[in-house]
Image (cartoon, helix red, strand yellow):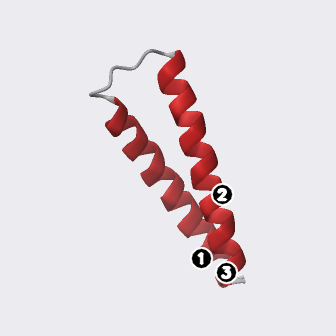
Amino acid sequence: MGLFFILFATLILVTFNSMTNALCLKKNIPEEKQPNVFRTINVLITILLISSYVEILFT
């Protein structure tokens, strides 16, 4: 179960990073602001994945 969730989480993070990259390119976000955008989105997605893992674990 844990291995499946780690693979799933990795797939989700890679997908969101590619969508974030497309967003940065489409909206012409400056290079110096892009790390902040990626960091914010990655932290929020990681929190979502951890909370869903905890919910699955204790349900």
SS class of the residue under badge 2?
Answer: helix
Specify few, some or many for label 1: CA neighbours under 10 Å numbering under 14, 14-19, or 20 or more: few
- The percent position of residue 55, horizontal first and vertical second, equals 65, 74
* CB contact under 8 Å: marks 1 and 2: no
What is the spatial separation of the Cα atoms under label 1 and label 3, in whole angstroms? 14 Å
Instruction: State the residue at coordinates (49%, 16%).
Output: 27
SS class of the residue under badge 1?
Answer: helix
Name the residue carrying label 1: 54
Q: Quadrant of the N terminus?
A: bottom right
User: Which sits earlier in the primary sequence, circle 1 or circle 3?
Assistant: 3
Q: Nearer the viewer, residue 46 or 24?
A: 24
- The percent position of residue 7, horizontal first and vertical second, equals 66, 69
What is the spatial separation of the Cα atoms under label 1 and label 2, in whole angstroms? 18 Å
Exactly how many numbered labels are in the figure?
3
Name the residue carrying label 3: 3
Q: Nearer the observer, disc 1 or disc 3?
A: 3
Instruction: State the residue at coordinates (59%, 44%).
Output: 16
SS class of the residue under badge 3?
Answer: helix
Q: Amino acid at mark 1?
A: Val
Specify few, some or many for label 2: CA neighbours under 10 Å numbering under 14, 14-19, or 20 or more: few
Instruction: State the residue at coordinates (67%, 80%).
Output: 3
- The percent position of residue 48, horizontal first and vertical second, equals 56, 58
Instruction: State the residue at coordinates (69%, 65%).
Output: 8
- The percent position of residue 54, horizontal first and vertical second, equals 59, 76
Q: Amino acid at mark 3?
A: Leu
Q: Amino acid at mark 2?
A: Leu
Quarter location, residue 36: top left
